[in-house]
């Protein structure tokens, strides 16, 4: 099948290219806009308590309001606010109120909202929508900031806006600048590395142009699929998609080009060489992409909409890249022919024996030593996983110089840490009868007695009298570990245990949402990891027609996963904070799935040489010599594209960039080039059990005359 696809693309290049250009234009014109979000609540299913609490609030208190943004006023000299300062705060708030920003209903200066030390005064911004990430509202907050800055001169005051909508604004702007930086750095990196590897400006530029087309198609397909499925995409998805598409797309292009060059060196005509290369590596690329797609699709089993959406988006990206690698890439290089390598002449001659041959000989001669040392190093690094601490506050990853981040720090320096975002407790009568006010007051005392609770507001009862709402201010930051443990543990337990009889109780608010996210993620890890592993094992088994080889391949990538996450813990995690809560699943999917590409490339070549009648040791030597340059080049480029994320200001993108880049390098240089060939040599022909029995017999047959006494690589070129 892959040979047929390759020949069609090579022999009808213009038809393939035109079809791709038409699809690109259609998707750009017709696809809806992809709308990412940072709101964690939008990613939880409806059966979680925090989501049900939000629904109770909507039904019982439709007019209740939480400020969408908070203005934090201070004196420029850091002193206490005077009465004149407080009047000035009120005047500025009134001036902003008169501006009439769209979807902003009130800008209120509350005289009582002054910190106990008298240094901070708050202004609350209320909106007509409860969706803090609403595009119009976020844009209005941006205009509000600009107008407020014009009212401040000569007042002796400084002002910063924080809160959900202000944070959403800063996050969006930071994401836009990050995407541009990641795109530019990725393009420069890929072009430079390809130029070094092939010494050809055509090959350096052409994959970038091809993947640019693939990127546009992918974004259109993802936007359409998200719109049809009703899924929201996480705000960081654009930056991740850039590195995935350019990294994986370049990898698959390199798989083809290296094999194409190999066939040209054997004397084949350009079109024949390209068609044979596409046929040979087509199965390898399809298997590699299938592993990645299956791993990403396993995220659809997640109860978290964020992970489900990310899994769907990344699976679509890799699927489109696979189709391009099998059709568009061969078509483009069919038109270019050997001019693609201009001005280099290296494609005409066989390379001299070098490092790869020495590595191949070493892997064949000392497999036990290599397996023991490389496996031991991975185990030692994996010990760092034991200290992993999850961080659920995604806003803490934002750059510290953003206005919303600085204003929140100033607010929390003057007020109780939980003042900016209280937790809500709802008590609802089960039969619709009015609640007993005396019992509600006693319930306030029960809640206030919980250790870690700063204060509890008197109950607010809805007009019907069957639902009461309490505002609970914690001693901790809303997203702090202590707050999550309290809300998800003792607070919820007390809310349910001490509530008046005949009522239902719900704990809501952002801290409750994060506590539910924590529960959902822990549940997802137990489900997604095994399912992804089983899917990868199945694909490897079908490709290799073997039961044994997939087992040790999965063990090796499992060690790679542990070593990668452990190294990231040691490098990034300190005593005050943890690592991105999604990091384990991201490392698992990217390192285990994408890193398996290199194992597949190596093992596919090993199987091919075994099928050609070579002994396991000789097959290992040749497979390493022929595959190591491809794997090395592809891994360096892919790791480099993910490493670009370390240039971002967002600390979680830095963690992700390092972890995936480091894991890919481990997968390539330790596992694919060293560990897997060494273990394959140790296992011998049993690696291919129960398939390839004829190949195993052939491998035990006498070697060709040219291999008995001389260099085992002589005459070993694949026809």
Image: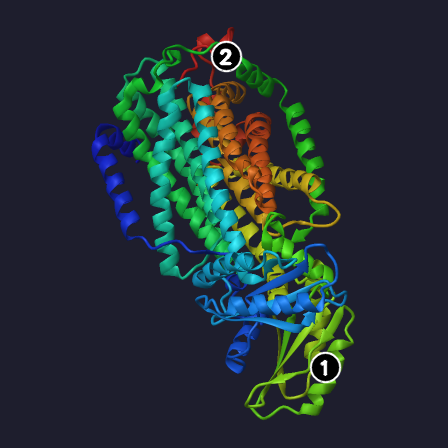
Q: Which mark is residue 173?
A: none
At x 71% / y 86%, what residue is drawn?
Answer: 441
Task: Give the spatial CA distance, label 1 vs label 2.
Answer: 83 Å
Task: Characterize the local packing of mark 2: few (<14), some (14-19) or many (20 or more) Cα atoms within 10 angstroms.
Answer: some
Q: Residue furthest top?
A: 709
Residue 679: x, y in percent? 59, 29
Mark yes or no: residue 544 visible.
no
Q: Which mark is residue 444?
A: 1
**112 or 496: nearer the viewer:** 112
At x 63% / y 59%, what residue is drawn?
Answer: 155
Picture quadrant where residue 413 is located: bottom right
Circle 1 or circle 2, nearest the eye:
1
Asked if residue 273 lies left or right of residue 123, the reply is left
What kind of colouring is applied to the model shown? rainbow
Task: Characterize the local packing of mark 1: few (<14), some (14-19) or many (20 or more) Cα atoms within 10 angstroms.
Answer: some
Looking at the rendered image, the quarter that the C terminus falls into is top left
Residue 177: x, y in percent? 49, 44
Mark yes or no: residue 361 visible.
yes
Which numbered disc, 1 or 2, marks the residue that appears first in the sequence?
A: 1
Q: Cβ–Cβ below 8 Å for labels 1 and 2?
A: no
Badge 1 element:
helix
Residue 153: x, y in percent? 59, 56
Badge 2 element:
loop
Q: Which mark is residue 712?
A: 2
């Amino acid at each position: 099948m892959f040979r047929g696809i390759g020949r069609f693309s090579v022999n009808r290049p213009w038809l393939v290219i035109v079809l791709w250009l038409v699809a690109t234009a259609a998707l750009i014109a017709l696809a809806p806009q992809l709308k990412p979000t940072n709101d964690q609540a939008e990613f939880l299913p409806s059966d979680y308590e925090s989501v049900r609490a939000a629904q109770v609030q909507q039904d019982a208190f439709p007019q209740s309001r939480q400020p969408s943004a908070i203005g934090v006023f201070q004196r420029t000299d850091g002193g206490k606010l005077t009465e004149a300062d407080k009047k000035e705060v009120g005047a500025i708030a009134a001036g902003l109120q008169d501006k009439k920003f769209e979807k902003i209903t009130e800008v209120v200066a509350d005289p009582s909202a002054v910190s106990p030390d008298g240094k901070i005064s708050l202004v609350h911004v209320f909106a007509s929508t409860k969706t803090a990430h609403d595009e119009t509202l976020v844009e209005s907050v941006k205009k509000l900031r600009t107008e407020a800055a014009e009212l401040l001169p000569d007042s002796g005051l400084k002002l910063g806006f924080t809160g959900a909508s202000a944070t959403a604004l800063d996050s969006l702007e930071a994401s836009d600048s990050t995407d541009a930086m990641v795109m530019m750095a990725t393009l420069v990196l890929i072009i430079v590395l390809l130029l070094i590897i092939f010494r050809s400006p055509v090959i350096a530029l052409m994959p970038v142009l091809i993947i640019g087309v693939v990127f546009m198609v992918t974004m259109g397909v993802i936007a359409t699929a998200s719109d049809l499925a009703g899924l929201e995409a996480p705000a960081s998805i654009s930056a991740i998609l850039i590195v995935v598409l350019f990294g994986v797309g370049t990898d698959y292009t390199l798989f083809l080009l290296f094999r194409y060059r190999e066939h040209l060196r054997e004397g084949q005509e350009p079109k024949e060489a390209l068609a044979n290369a596409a046929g040979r590596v087509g199965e390898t690329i399809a298997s590699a992409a299938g592993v990645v797609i299956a791993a990403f699709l396993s995220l659809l089993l997640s109860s978290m909409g964020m992970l489900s959406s990310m899994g769907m988006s990344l699976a679509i990206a890799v699927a489109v890249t696979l189709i391009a690698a099998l059709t568009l890439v061969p078509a483009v290089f069919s038109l270019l022919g050997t001019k693609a390598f201009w001005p280099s002449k290296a494609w005409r001659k066989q390379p001299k024996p070098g490092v790869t041959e020495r590595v191949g000989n070493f892997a064949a001669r000392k497999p036990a030593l290599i397996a023991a040392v490389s496996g031991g190093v991975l185990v030692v690094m994996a010990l760092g996983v034991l200290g992993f601490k999850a961080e659920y506050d995604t806003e803490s990853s934002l750059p510290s110089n953003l206005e919303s981040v600085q204003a929140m720090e100033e607010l929390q320096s003057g007020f109780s840490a939980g003042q900016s975002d209280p937790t809500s407790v709802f008590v609802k009568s089960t039969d619709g009868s009015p609640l007993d006010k005396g019992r509600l007051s006693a319930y306030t005392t029960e809640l206030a007695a919980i250790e870690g609770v700063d204060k509890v507001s008197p109950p607010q009862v809805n007009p019907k009298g069957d639902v009461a709402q309490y505002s609970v201010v914690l001693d901790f930051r809303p997203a702090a570990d202590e707050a999550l443990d309290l809300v998800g543990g003792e607070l919820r337990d007390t809310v349910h245990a001490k509530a008046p009889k005949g009522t239902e109780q719900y704990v809501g608010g952002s801290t409750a949402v994060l506590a539910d996210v924590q529960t959902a993620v822990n549940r997802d890890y137990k489900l997604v990891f095994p399912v992804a592993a089983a899917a990868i094992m199945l694909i490897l088994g079908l490709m290799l027609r073997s039961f044994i080889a997939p087992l040790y391949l999965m063990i090796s990538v499992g060690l790679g996963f542990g070593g990668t996450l452990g190294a990231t813990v040691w490098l990034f995690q300190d005593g005050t904070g943890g690592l991105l809560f999604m990091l384990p699943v991201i490392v698992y999917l990217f390192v285990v799935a994408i890193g398996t590409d290199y194992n597949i490339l190596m093992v596919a070549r090993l199987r091919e040489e075994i099928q050609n009648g070579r002994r396991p040791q000789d097959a290992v030597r040749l497979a390493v010599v022929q595959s190591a340059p491809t794997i090395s080049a592809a891994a360096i480029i892919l790791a480099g594209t993910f490493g670009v994320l370390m240039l971002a200001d967002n600390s979680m993108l830095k963690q992700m960039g390092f972890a995936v880049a480091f894991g890919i390098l481990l997968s390539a240089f330790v596992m694919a080039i060293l560990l897997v060939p060494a273990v394959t040599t140790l296992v011998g022909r049993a690696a291919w059990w129960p398939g390839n029995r004829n190949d195993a017999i052939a491998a035990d047959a006498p070697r060709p005359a040219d291999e008995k006494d001389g260099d085992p690589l002589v005459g070993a070129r694949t026809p």
